[in-house]
Image: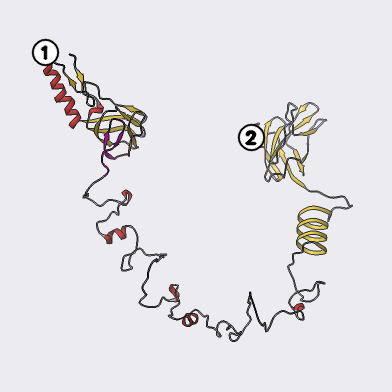
Amino acid sequence: MASTYSTNLGIELIGTGEQSGTWGTTTNTNLGTLIEQAISGYAQYACTGGTDTITIPDGATGVARNMYLELTGTGGGTLVVPAKKKLYFVYNATASAITVKVSGQTGVSVPASAKMVLVNNGTDVVNAVNYLAALTLGTALPIASGGTGATSASAARTALDVPQTNGTGASGTWAINISGSAGSLSSTLAVANGGTGATTASGARTNLGLAIGTDVPSPTGTGASGTWGINISGNAATVTNGITTSNISSYAPGLTGSGASGTWGINISGNAATATSATTATTATTATNATNATNATNATNATNATTATTLSTASGSAPVYGARAWVRFDGTGTAGTNMTIAASGNVASVYKNSTGDYTVTFNTAMPDANYAVFGSFHSGVGGCNVSPFMDTSGNYIAPSASSFRLIFNTQYGVSETAYLFIVVFR
């Protein structure tokens, strides 16, 4: 009967009547090499940083049979061991974590410089220990490992940067929430410390400069003489000094603009015949300065004007519309790069696709792609024209709200110069 091998350690089991005269050699290998390797073997293995595989060969020495594995070389990879039940002590002497596992399984990640006890349960490698009945360390467990780095409560508080029970240590400002029952302070909390310095409501108001009838008016309005701005909500029985229909012109302009002389900031919506300075005017016949004017018949300065009938520099009754973007640039740069812009408005970049072919990108996108593009350029030949929304092959290139493409042509084909001009209207 031929030899067989043990399931986990690959020890040769000599068949009955086999190896007459040589069985001693096999037995010595089993006991003096293979079993010794499994019980007390210490092996160094140089990892590659990728997937490394070690084995337990039948009847022969193998790295995976050793009890203690010191992993050297390059970390960050995986060490694959055979699916055989066995205890391992693993020391990761590399600079990166290494996962020890059975092929196709999850395994355990051994951090750099860590020493761990693992066990192969025949399916995968798992932690061999997850409970200690008692533990005594030679030195305090550091904060980085979940400890305090100290051997006494006082030293632990210092290490964790919290105040001592007597209030010393960890200087600074602390916000403390107290829940449950807080008995009492031995004395009042001073105003300088966020308290009132008093034990009664009236004393607190006095300390805080809120004494009724002295610092603030009483509910009846007496005391604390002076001018007060008071908001009254709910029911106010009597107002001694207030705005009435008979004295309102002293405090606010009338509808005709009379009374209460001075400078007033007024927002008018609806219809205003004349507005010298209007922040927002829906319809203004004349607006000297209008921040936003939806319809302004005459606007000297309008930041945003949807429709302005007359501007200070325009005549006639036809509407006037401003350009939404413009640019002057040098088109002779290298293809595949952004061109040099001499001056512009609402243009982020001009990119050169090829000779005479450019893509213009806005700083602020248009409301849609329904805008008009006009251009011109300086050339020493005739037949100059600018073709927006087109490439050099004559294909239509649809514009977007944020950019568009165009080409510059002369009678001889696409062209480029150092003086190219573009204006966009919408």
Q: Earlier in the sequence, mark 2 or mark 1?
A: 1
Q: Amino acid at mark 1?
A: Ser
Indicate yes or no whether the magenta region holds residue 115: yes
* Towards the viewer: 16 or 45: 16
Q: Residue 209's spot in the image, x, y percent?
A: 51, 80
Element at label 1:
loop
Taking 211 as reference, is 288 above or below it? above
* Residue sitting at x 25%, y 52%: 140
* Residue kind at label 2, given as amino acid type: Thr
The kind of secondary structure element at disc 2 is: loop
Task: Judge left or right: residue 73 versus residue 12.
Answer: right
Disc 2 designates what residue?
Answer: 337
From the viewer's side, name the closer residue of 293 and 346. 293
Q: Position of residue 377 (x, y in %)?
A: 78, 36
Quadrant assignment, res 124 = top left
As drawn, which residue projects farthest toward the left? Answer: 21
Report the coloring of the rendering.
Answer: secondary structure
Q: Is residue 389 above or below residue 137?
A: above
What range of the chain is rendered magenta?
A: 112-130
Specify the label residue 20 is tagged with.
1
Residue at image coords 18%, 31%: 39
